[in-house]
Image (tube, rainbow, N blue to C red):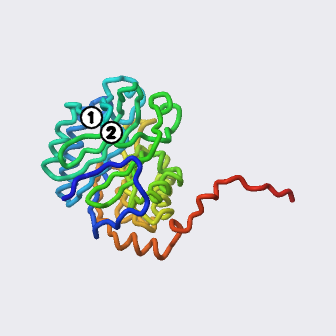
Amino acid sequence: MRPTALNGSPSPGAAAPPPSLTVAAVQAEAVPGDVAGNAARAAQLARITADQGATLAVLPELFLPAYHPPVLKRTATDVAADGAGRVADGRLDPLRAAARERGVVVVVGAAVRHPDGRRTCAALVVDRAGEVSAAYDKQHLCGPDEKALFTPGASGATLVVDGWRFGLGVCYDGCFPEHGRAAAVAGAHACVYPSGYVVGSEHRRDVYYAARALDNSMYVVFANSVGGVAPWRFNGGAAIYDPEGRPLERAPDEGERVVVATLDASEVDRVRAAHAMLAEHRPDQGKRRPELAA
């Protein structure tokens, strides 16, 4: 297998991916504040996905500390990244070992402290050598809790796994059509969204990520938390959407689940040929237009 690569500014016109890649979206419940325990559970889930043939596994937003704002106020819930984005926290060793042993790339949510003092809601990537990188910082922070806890990210990022290009996002990023479009224009064949949707948001959860897939003729891998106690009780529904926005696999709203599907490069090509929105989008549509009085 070719190594995983990260590129913060992917270039358009990327080569076609290999014919297929099997991916997994996970819904699971994390224990608030227990980074070591949640990392160990993430390692178990990574092994489960690998046993089902997945090369890439996506776990929920902030899974390592758990999405629980009162507990997230503690610095012990953070992992530290160095200037190059590398994370060496020993609490993640079980997850590193699982990635190495099973040859699976893992995307998992974390609270990351950067050398300049910024704290971000990040997507970590654990590669098949067991190296951990703070690969992407959530650009769109949702609500007062997140805005009080984190600094928004400043740029997009692309994860390349065996020639497949995945735009990285976190939860609320996927509510913005421009986020998925920027990834697709930059050459992404798919986007991944580790997320934390609470009970009551099921309709929006099921519309946003299907729409990002349909908007951009690409696959979308949506992972979500499940369980917890209100107001931070999460609604599952992890899913993998095809380039027409149809769920290839979707989990129920309750219970821990792993959903697995194989991405097909010929399907990306077929849909992009049949529905040319991506090729025909007009980058000038955001320019100011005259207003007409009637």
Using residue 220 as the reference point, say whether residue 290 is left or right of it: right
Q: Quadrant of residue 125?
A: top left
Local packing at callout 1 (Cα closer than 10 Å; few below 14, some 14-19, many 20+) is: many
Q: Secondary structure at mark 1?
A: strand
Q: Amino acid at mark 1?
A: Val
The image position of residue 151, as x and y in percent, is: 46, 32
Q: Name the one closer to the observer, 43 or 19.
A: 19
Q: Name the one closer to the observer, 180 or 142.
A: 180
Local packing at callout 2 (Cα closer than 10 Å; few below 14, some 14-19, many 20+) is: many
Q: Secondary structure at mark 2?
A: strand
Q: Name the one closer to the observer, 222 or 15.
A: 15
Give residue 225's mark.
none
The image position of residue 99, as x and y in percent, is: 18, 47
Q: Does 60 appear above or below 247?
A: above
Q: Which residue is mark 2?
A: 134
Q: Quadrant of residue 111?
A: top left
Q: Does 117 appear above or below 181?
A: above
Q: Which residue is mark 1?
A: 87
Instruction: Work out whether residue 142 can be spotted.
Output: yes
- CA gap, disc 1 to disc 2? 7 Å
- Label 1–label 2 contact, CB within 8 A: yes
Q: Does 226 appear above or below 261?
A: above
Q: Residue at x 29, y 51 (%)?
A: 5
Q: Residue at x 15, y 42 (%)?
A: 97
Q: Residue at x 22, y 53 (%)?
A: 3
Q: Residue at x 23, y 47 (%)?
A: 127
Q: Amino acid at mark 2?
A: Ala
Q: Quadrant of the N terminus?
A: bottom left
Sooner in the amino-acid sequence: mark 1 or mark 2: 1
